Image (cartoon, rainbow, N blue to C red):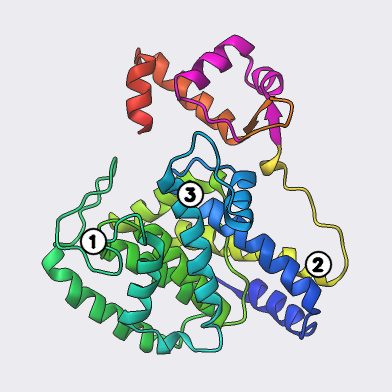
């Protein structure tokens, strides 16, 4: 992996520093919600982007959503706030206490028994062939991990951040919250190094998880590193357009489709889309003020997967279990 392009973009951004307070606050607010929404969505939280903003910024509860989903949103935002307070430090200064503290904030009120503590039970990743370390090995593996962090100054900051994330989720030191803690650690290292945070979009969830699993099973890590590198590159572009006063480009991947638009795109009827939604196979991204259900482009890929599984003569119930 080469990171010259990212280094050059960061240097261009550095030339604009210090950034105007109003611009910094605006970008911070946007990234705070986007990181919270996407990181939780990767783990299965069903709050939409708009709902996440209402919960985090306004303290409003969303009907039909669980207390845990609300806590996941507020906890992640608080953990990110703590991360931002550490940016004057160096990655080599990070300690076991810092990682445990991030995890404690993430699971506060959700699992108070285990928050901020290493696991003492065996765990498996649902649907994955990856075998995780025995819980008895976790303390020693984490001590080695902290030692590695302190002695890896030769790596490019983006590679260091990505590698730290990969190593932490591979150790899987906690009973829950490993992915969110690892992504926050990765973004802490990026911020410490002068880079913006990396947002792994919801639509990239499958590629992101698959690339991690490929590396954990002994394959190349390059696909995973490319995903993180592209995430940092997108964030740099957002900052550079903002400081130059350019309009942000609309990311087509974030476009939301009405049910009819989705149906036409995949060559299906509205009634089938509604039925699959009711069955829990398709997710509604947002509901407009007048009650229209909107779907993300992710659902196009999901529908293709459903069709593929139906060709294997699986029932909708069996397909739903596959998705779980």
User: Residue 94 falls in which quadrant of the image?
Assistant: bottom left
Is residue 1 visible to the viewer in this orientation of the structure?
no
Q: Which residue is mark 1?
A: 113
Q: Secondary structure at mark 3?
A: helix
Q: Nearer the viewer, residue 134 or 174?
A: 174
Relative placement, left or right, of 27 versus 209 is right
Distance between the alpha carbons at the discs numbered 3 and 2: 31 Å
How far across and down, in percent of the image, does residue 20 sit?
81, 79
Residue plotted at (79% across, 72% down): 23
Residue 204: % across, % down? 53, 47
Query: Picture coordinates of residue 125 (x, y %)?
Result: 27, 48
Q: Which residues are magenta?
A: 256-285
User: Is 180 inside the magenta-drawn segment?
Assistant: no
Label 1, residues with CA under 10 Å away: few <14, some 14-19, many ≥20: few
Closest to the camera, between mark 1 and mark 2, is 1
* 22 left or right, relative to 271: right
Q: Which residue is mark 2?
A: 242
Residue drawn where x is 59% and y is 48% of the image: 60
Mark 1 lies on a secondary structure that is loop
Residue 136: x percent and y percent? 11, 68
Query: If you read the primary sequence from the N terminus, does the residue marked by circle 1 or circle 2 appear first?
Result: 1
* CA separation in Å, label 1 and label 3: 19 Å
| As drawn, 150 above or below 26 | below
Is 47 positioned to the left or the right of 31 in the image? left
Mark 3 = which residue? 70
């Amino acid at each position: 992996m080469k990171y010259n392009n990212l280094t050059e973009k960061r240097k261009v951004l550095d030339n604009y520093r210090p950034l105007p307070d109003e611009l910094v606050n605006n970008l911070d607010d946007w990234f705070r919600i986007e990181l919270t929404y996407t990181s939780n969505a990767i783990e299965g939280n069903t709050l939409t982007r708009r709902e996440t903003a209402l919960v985090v910024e306004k303290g409003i509860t969303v009907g039909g959503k669980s207390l845990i989903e609300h806590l996941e949103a507020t906890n992640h935002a608080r953990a990110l706030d703590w991360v931002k307070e550490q940016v004057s430090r160096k990655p080599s200064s990070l300690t076991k206490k810092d990682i445990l503290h991030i995890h404690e904030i993430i699971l506060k009120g959700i699992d108070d028994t285990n928050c901020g503590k290493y696991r003492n039970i065996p765990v498996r990743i649902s649907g994955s062939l990856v075998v995780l370390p025995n819980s008895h090995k976790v303390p020693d593996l984490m001590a080695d991990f902290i030692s590695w962090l302190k002695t890896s100054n030769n790596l490019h900051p983006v590679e260091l951040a990505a590698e730290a994330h990969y190593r932490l989720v591979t150790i899987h030191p906690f009973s829950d919250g490993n992915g969110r803690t690892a992504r926050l650690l990765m973004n802490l290292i990026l911020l410490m190094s002068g880079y913006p945070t990396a947002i792994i979009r919801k639509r990239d969830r499958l590629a992101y998880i698959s690339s991690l699993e490929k590396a954990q099973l002994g394959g190349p890590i390059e696909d995973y590193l490319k995903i993180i590198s592209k995430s940092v590159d997108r964030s740099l572009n957002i900052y550079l357009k903002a400081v130059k006063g350019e309009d942000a480009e609309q990311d087509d991947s974030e476009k939301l489709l009405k049910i009819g638009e989705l149906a036409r795109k995949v060559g299906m009827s509205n009634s089938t889309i509604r039925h699959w939604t009711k069955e829990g196979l398709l997710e509604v991204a947002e509901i407009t003020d007048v009650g229209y259900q909107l779907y993300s482009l992710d659902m196009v890929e999901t529908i293709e997967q459903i069709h593929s599984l139906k060709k294997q003569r699986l029932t909708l119930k069996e397909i739903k279990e596959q998705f779980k």
